Amino acid sequence: MFPRPIQSRSSNYQLAYKILVPVALFIWLLPLLAIFMTSLRPAADINTGNMFGWPSEFKLVENYLTVFRESQAVTYFFNSIKVTIPTVMISVSLACMAGYALSIYRFRAALPLFFMFVAGNFVPFQILMVPVRDLAVQTNLYNTVTGLVLFHAAFQTGFCTLFMRNFIKALPFDLIESARIEGVSEYKIFWYVVLPLVRPAIAALSVLVFTFVWNDFFWATVLTNGEATKPITAGIQSLNGQFVSRWHLVSAASLMAAIPPVAMFFAMQKHFIAGLTLGAVK
Amino acid sequence: MKKYRQNQQCSAPWVFLAPALLFFTIYVIFPIFRSIWISFYEWDGIGQATWVGLANYVELLDDDRFYTSLKNNIIWLVCFMLAVPAGLLVALFLNQTIWGMRFYKSMFFFPFVISQVVVGLIFSWFYNPNFGIVGKVWEYFGAVPPSILGDERFVTYGIIFAGLWPQVAYCMILYLTGLNNISSDQIEAGRLDGAKGWRMLRYVVLPQLWPATFLAIVVTVIGALRSFDMIATMTRGGPWGSSNVLSFFMYETALSEYGFRMGYGSAIAVVLFMIMLVFIGYFLWVMYQDERRT
């Protein structure tokens, strides 16, 4: 292990370390703590300038209720869900198939096509912006949830295919070979042999794509403009304008937006990290 | 029968690839070429597009906003790279087994999971000279607090600092997983040879961490060039365009109150794309070398 295990050091050193870690964590998460404390405060604290001290009263429930009552936050929240869930399902399914095709079969186009998916995944969004928006307008999908889902699904397919292909490539090829010798059709091999084996990859991709799409802000602003379709990230932005200097409400709304991906992360931590490291760093 | 099976082995990959290829071509590949094409037109997005040849690019060369954005993009690239060593440092700090370490590690990773819009909001509030933390600290020392987001000299660095927070978390997690997999034999061998501290890190640990480092560099470069959310939430490119970057400048030109100049916007996007292409080319080359070895 590197650095040297702390257990081999003097007990003073160990104690210092055990104190230092929580202190460092506290400083690291200070911005989040501050926003959380602010979401508990009454408006009076904000007005009197008590931004970082102990709240004079706890108004957690009231603040969140005010956000619900005075804004479209609930609509935004459900819009985000309506965009995110179908995107995850489409992009992960497409990637399972594409990843299978690119890893199991040896054909000349396999590597170039794989690199195309990888490269597409890295392009700046702005090079896609004008045509994608125009396409959405032409097909009457501008300012609809469907329009957002189709784009996100297509774009995330690049990343998912990259991950899936590498994952399937690392599976033992003998399994497929012996199924072929048994006379199992290619489609059945995919369904009965490969799919059960890639379940961890599906889990990893689902949590990651969920987080990416949930947190997307750019496409939410480019492809929607109405209250009825706006996802939460774009919604927070307009709430910020609406609740000028009512920081307790902005904080409450921001925390609300952060809850689903955070819950997802803590529930599926192992898969999440496996996904982020692309399986390349094991 | 044999013939049929061989046929299936030839056609199956294309059947499996078709849906993904279709989606990806319509929404990613084709739009890239269409953007390049549009950059030769003057177009408001609705009416008739007029061919103007290279005029958009010529105009770009004479546009101060373009140079400010380009300069800021370079500052972003350079400063954002700090996330890689910083992430390594945090990972080395946390790579111990004490009670509760798993919890600490995941809490350190926390900032990466939150939307950048939220991170941007938190920091713009922190930076506020009247009631933010910066204001409080400066007042405590009896100084006049600077307006970080209102001052052309500090604004870009202020936003980058906020952006580094989640990015360091990301690099940290890459390094933590990397450190977890280091061969302990080599570390022991190194110890026997008397290597420790910096020399151990430099000659034994870092070479083994190369996959993590490579990935950390890739995601940090992409993150730096994609920076948009933070700028949109914190300053909208201000004050007076001094914190603009190409991605936001493009958006502003093509889709905002400053007019719908799709052609000019696309020209900016093409420049950004070309910069990114250099890095993408390098990444693909490294990946290709890996592929050939296996």
Image (cartoon, coloured by chain):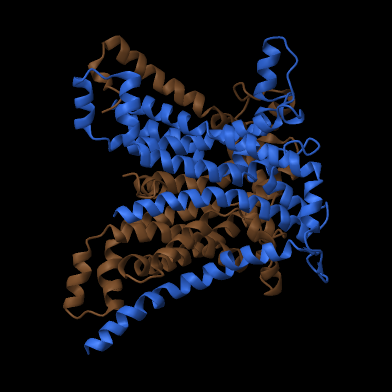
Figure chain in brown:
A
Quadrant of the snapshot with the C terminus of chain A: top left
**Towards the viewer: A138 or B117:** A138
Expressed as whole percent of the image width and height from the top left, the position of residue B183 reads 23, 35
Asked if residue A161 lies left or right of residue B208, the reply is right
Figure chain in blue:
B
Residue at 35% over, 72% down: A107
- In the rendered view, tell whether residue A161 sits above or below residue A254: below
**Towards the viewer: B216 or A28:** B216
Q: In this rendering, does residue A35 appear at all?
A: no
Asked if residue B215 lies left or right of residue B50, the reply is left
Asked if residue A282 lies left or right of residue B244, the reply is left
**Towards the viewer: B286 or B143:** B286
Residue at 83% over, 51% down: B258
Quadrant of the snapshot with the N terminus of chain A: top left
Expressed as whole percent of the image width and height from the top left, the position of residue B40 reads 75, 63
Q: In this rendering, does residue B287 appear at all?
A: yes
Residue at 49% over, 44% down: B219
